[in-house]
Amino acid sequence: MLKVAKIAFYTIVLAGFFIIAIIWLRANDLFVLNRVNVVGNRLLTSEEIIDLADLDFSKEIFDIDVDAVRERLLSNELIKSVKITRYRPSAIKIKVTEKDLIAVSAGSRLNTVTSDGLIVDTDNFRAIYDLPMITGSHFIYDSLGQKIVSDDMWDMVYILNIIRTLDLQLYHSISEINFNYDSGVILFFGDRPLPIILGFDDYMDKIYNLYIFYAHMRNSDELNRIKAIDARFAGQIITQ
């Protein structure tokens, strides 16, 4: 019985110390937000994300409405998802997942296209400056008035996805991808730019042949003397 009483006594004492510590910490503003750690961002700067989050640095981290902060962040067209975590005593971590942009679509204004075929309106230069330009095909509107990719544009997104997966350097060397009803898909490569004719259909095999060709030629001066590359025919690359 005495042992039980001692345990109860020490439990009460420890609980009292804990409550006093919490009161002291709060009285000295040690839970007030003073640090924000942003991770996962590439297109947006940490400063832009913190500004958009509109955090109240006069509040304790437990009083911050993280759901409201998440909604403000998701209002940005480049952010796909957000996870917010509180870290005692006074920090918040914001982990963002940005949309995976793969190309820019030319039109009356620039629209970016994601790797899964979504249209994103943005004027963020960092997000678009290194993306290939889609020409010859434009987005369309669905029954709800939302912008979606056309079938021809989706083929070009599919092609860019394959190229980016196979060879990131080759992908970043593509300045333009064009579709026309006579020649099909044409890539424009490098600063010249060098046309690469893919034609219609069977893009996987054609791109793999191009990948092998480019891997062999990328450090060769001969690549600079080629005027055009024709990859339309099965199992071969024809140069001019």
Image: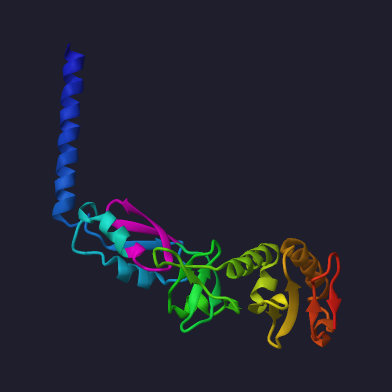
Q: Where is residue 75? Give x, y as percent.
A: 34, 66
Which residue shows up at 61% across the image and 69% down it?
Answer: 152
Give the quadrant of residue 233.
Answer: bottom right
Q: Where is residue 124? Give x, y as percent.
A: 44, 78
Q: Is 36 above or below relative to 224?
A: above
Which residue shows up at 55% across the image and 68% down it?
Answer: 150
**Residue 80 within the magenta-colored segment of the rendering:** yes
Give the quadrant of residue 16.
Answer: top left
Left or right side of 71 for 1 = left
**Residue 60 within the magenta-colored segment of the rendering:** no
Q: Nearer the viewer, residue 191 or 155?
A: 155
Q: Nearer the viewer, residue 191 or 89?
A: 191
Question: Furthest-top residue in view?
Answer: 1
Q: How is the image coloured?
A: rainbow
Q: Which residue range is magenta in the image?
A: 73-97
Q: Is 126 above or below relative to 54?
A: below
Left or right side of 3 for 190 = right
Quadrant of the drawing holding the C terminus? bottom right
Q: Where is residue 238? Give x, y as percent.
A: 85, 76
